[in-house]
Image (cartoon, grey):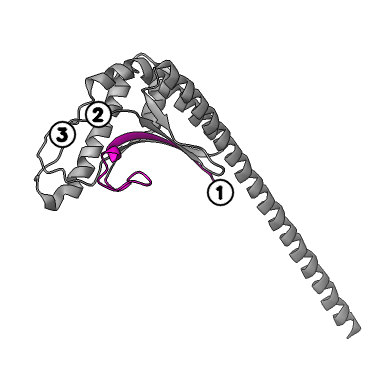
Amino acid sequence: MAGVAVVFLLLAVIFILEARKQREAAILEKEAAIGKVDSQKEGVQASLLALREDLISLDATLDGGFIALSGLDGGVNALEIEFKNLQFGLGQCRTPLAYVEQFERGAIPLIHRVCEAVDGMRDAGAEPSIILEGHTDDRPFLGTSGECGVRNGVAQVSFENNVRASAARAQEVFFTIRSQLRDAGYELDCLDANFVVSGRGQTAPRSGTTGSDPSNRRLVIRVRGDLRL
């Protein structure tokens, strides 16, 4: 009986030691994961802060009328770049001529800086994304416009038409930017590999505005770094 008791005691000790070993391994794994996430977060924030400073300088060289930037508070992992004064005429979705001229001056340096930030976030282990978003106010788009891809200009489908119009405008601006990069290898490759074009319609009004506020008709580039857990 004493021998059996010793065997059971040894098994218990082995079980306890193995359980402790597994707990310690789990703790180390968790600490490593936390360290990885912290490193990604620091890399994302450093890249976005550098991007914001670079774009402030770029806008100043373009007379301060090209882009506006969101703030970056603690914990924020995205920067919103809005094109200033980019207004489309009623029923129109082609890039306004005045903004084509802005892109002739600003497209390459803008995309170059955005792509450098994306490279920095990817190097930090995060998953970056670049989204060109079109937005509208919530007033009905009641006209018909083959240029904007809308149809059935009646109130019942105004939501759908706003989404279509915002997407068409975002696509048009994307192609306008891309046309300025035809001889820019790095910037063109980055644009094609990373950019997503999205039409948000009236679903994301500016904070503090009503849905009908005309300032909600805007185009923005959202540069984001998501953490890989």
Q: Earlier in the sequence, mark 3 or mark 2?
A: 3
Amino acid type at image mark 2: Glu
- In the rendered structure, find residue 172 and report the number of the disc placed on it: 2
Amino acid type at image mark 3: Leu
Q: Badge 3 local density, few (<14 within 10 Å), some, or many (20+)?
A: few
Q: Which residue is mark 1?
A: 229
Q: Which residue is mark 3?
A: 90
Label 1: state its secondary structure.
loop
Nearer the observer: mark 3 or 2; the answer is 3
Label 2: state its secondary structure.
helix
* Residue 70 spot, x, y in % from top left: 44, 36
- Which residue range is magenta in the image? 202-229
Q: Earlier in the sequence, mark 1 or mark 3?
A: 3
Nearer the observer: mark 1 or 2; the answer is 2
Q: CA distance from mark 3 to mark 2?
A: 15 Å
Q: Is residue 216 magenta?
A: yes
Label 3: state its secondary structure.
loop
228 with respect to 21 (left or right): left
Q: Nearer the viewer, residue 112 or 185?
A: 112
Q: Nearer the viewer, residue 194 or 44?
A: 44
161 with respect to 38 (left or right): left
Q: CA distance from mark 1 to mark 2?
A: 36 Å
Outermost residue to the bottom = 1
